[in-house]
Amino acid sequence: MTIQSNFTTSDGVRLALHIDDFTDPWKKAPVLVMLHAAMGSSRRFYSMVPGLARHFRVVRLDTRGHGESQIPPASLPLDKARLTRDVVEALEHLGLDRVHVLGNSAGGYAGQQLAIHYPARVLSLVLFGSAPGFKGEQGKRWLADAAVRGMRPVFAETINDRFPIGEVDQRLVDWFMDEICSNDLAWLARYIGYWTDTEFMDEVSAIACPTLIVAPGAEPIGSVSAYLEMHKRITNSQVVTYAKARHNICDYLPDACVADALAFYRRHFPSEIAA
C-alpha cells in the first residue's frame, strides 16, 4: 500500500518518492502531491497521510537535499525554477498529468510556483503556513548562529515559534528536533538561504486553481498579513486562520489540517471526494 521509489532529475540529482494508496482498488483515485517544509522530509507528513490516503493516491516527494533525496553538489544552481522543475519531473516520472498539490511552509513555495508556471498541471492548491517566500533576516540569523553554536541549541531556541510548548507532547518536539538536526547544515544554508532572499507576492495573482490558504494565527515565522494579502490576490481562494496557532500546524494539528483540506476538496471536487 506504500511504495518507495527514486528518479533522477534532468540535472542529475536523485530524488526519493513515497506513494501511499489506501483508496478502494476498484475506483480511479485522484492524486495528491504533498510537498514538505524546509529542514524536514516527507516523514513529517506521517500524521496527515492516513486521513488523506483513503481518498487520494498520495505522492510524497523528498525535496532535494532533504530526507532520502540526494544532496546536490555545490556546482549545481539552486533557484525556484529548479525546485519547481523537480516537482514537474516527478509527475513526468510517474506518468501523471494533473494533480492536487498540498504544500507545507517551504513546500508550499514550490507548490505556488507550480500553480503559477505550470497551471495545466495543478487541479487545486492547499497551503499550510506557506507565504510567497521567506525574504528577511529571520532565517539568516538561524543559519549564522547554527554555523557557530550548532543546529540543536539554535533551533531549540526557536521551538516556541513552532509549537505551543506545554500544550503538545514533548516527545513530538524531541522527534521534530531530531528530524531537523538530521539535515546537512551546509545544504540548509544554501536552500533556506535562497528563500531568505526570495519573495514572489507579485506573482501569486496568476494562480487560477481553487486554493486554500491555512494561516497560523499567531505566526512568528513570517507574517500573518502575508496570508491575507495572498487571499486578496488569488481570485479563487479561501483563507482559514487557526487562532493562536504557531507555525508548524501540520506537525501538531494534523487532524484539523486534514479535516479542513477534505472539506475544501469536497466543496470544489464533490465527484472525487465522497462525504
Image: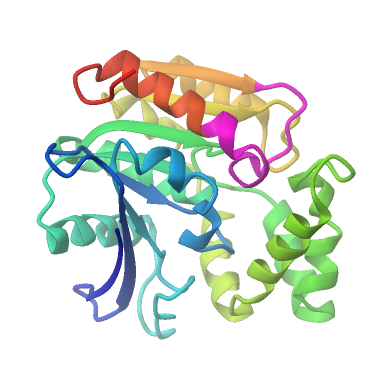
Where the C terminus falls, by quadrant? top left
Q: Is residue 94 above or below residue 134?
A: below
Q: How many marks?
A: 0
Left or right: residue 28 compared with residue 142: left
Seen at 70% across and 64% down, the residue is 175
**Can residue 108 be seen here?**
no
Left or right: residue 134 compared with residue 259: right
> What residue span does the magenta drawing correspond to?
242-257
Seen at 30% across and 47% down, the residue is 22
Find residue 69 and report its horizontal and vertical position in percent: 40, 75
Hey, which quadrant is residue 108 in on the image? top left
Q: How was this image coloured?
A: rainbow
Q: Is residue 127 above or below residue 140?
A: above
Find residue 128 and report its horizontal and vertical position in percent: 53, 36
Q: Residue furthest right?
A: 166
Q: Is residue 206 above or below residue 146?
A: above
Find residue 199 and report its horizontal and vertical position in percent: 50, 43
Seen at 71% across and 68% down, the residue is 143
Task: Look at the image and say whether residue 246 sits in the magenta stretch.
Answer: yes
Seen at 66% across and 44% down, the residue is 248
Find residue 208 and report its horizontal and vertical position in percent: 26, 24
Task: Look at the image and say whether residue 184 sits in the magenta stretch.
Answer: no
Where the N terminus falls, by quadrant? bottom left
